Image (tube, rainbow, N blue to C red):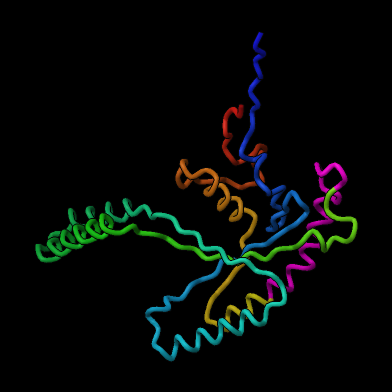
Amino acid sequence: MTQTTAPIRATTQEFLEIEDIIDDTLILKNGAAAIVLETTAVNFGLLSEEEQDALIYSYAAFLNSLSFPLQIVIMSKKMDISSYLNEIISSEGKETDITIKSQLKKYHQFIISIVKENKVLEKKFYLVLPFSPLELGAKGAFSSSKSKLNYSREYILGRAKASLIPKKDHVLRQLSRIGLKGQQLNTQELVEIFYAIFNPTTGKAELGDVKGYTKPLVEGLGEVR
């Protein structure tokens, strides 16, 4: 007689490495932590040769100044320009000047042709500053069961912030020397980024204050057999 195995219900949340997001800081399940900085960018190709050389020198100086690990993350996503096209159509319909109306129509067709031939991408640049669980001491982050953190989230958060804040300040100073601006992502922004990554089919959803959520923001995977 064949035995029927009951399906195991699992959610994406269970497979994520993130334990929690507290006070603008990522707490991971292995006892590590991290903060994320968003930075502006420079169009290197539009710079003169002298400006390019200066930027390369400044970037090299930035890398040489680092005494800790740092991860550079570039996120690209296809932009939805439908609302922009609708604005052009609306302006075209309201315009009474024949010449301007004709130019708006040509511009509209030009934008459509660009979108058909090339993907319009939005790129965002992030710097991730990690905190290693080894910095918690010889005891380590995990208990022998490997199922729970050996330290409270509050303790890990305190140690992580003490280590990461000076590093963040150093990176922001170095970025300003390159001509870039950076800022630390807050809890709300971090949640929205991970929500967009793990729920790509929902589109750009408007999330309320994360403090108001009582259940995971990541959709379930259904049944796992």
User: Looking at the rendering, which quadrant does residue 163 occupy?
Assistant: bottom right
Up/down of 6 relative to 34, above or below: above
Quarter in which the C terminus is drawn: top right
- Nearest the eye: 57 or 3: 3
Determine the residue located farthest toward the bottom in the rendered image.
Answer: 50
Q: Is residue 139 left or right of residue 59?
A: right
Q: Is residue 112 left or right of residue 172?
A: left
Residue 27 drawn at (x, y percent) = 73, 53
Quarter in which the N terminus is drawn: top right
Dominant secondary structure of the magenta stretch? helix
**Residue depicted at 18% across the width and 61% down the height:** 104
Determine the residue located farthest toward the top in the rendered image.
Answer: 1
- Nearest the eye: 73 or 196: 73
**Residue depicted at 28% across the width and 57% down the height:** 115
Q: Which residues are magenta?
A: 143-169
Residue 126 drawn at (x, y percent) = 56, 65
Determine the residue located farthest toward the left in the rendered image.
Answer: 98
**Residue depicted at 30% across the width and 59% down the height:** 118
Residue 146 drawn at (x, y percent) = 82, 44
- 160 in the magenta segment: yes
Q: Is residue 89 left or right of residue 75?
A: left
User: Looking at the rendering, which quadrant does residue 116 occupy?
Assistant: bottom left
Query: How many discs appear?
Result: 0
Residue 86 drawn at (x, y percent) = 27, 51
Determine the residue located farthest toward the right in the rendered image.
Answer: 139
- 135 in the magenta segment: no
**Residue depicted at 54% across the width and 82% down the height:** 178
Up/down of 97 relative to 90, above or below: below
Up/down of 137 relative to 198, above or below: below
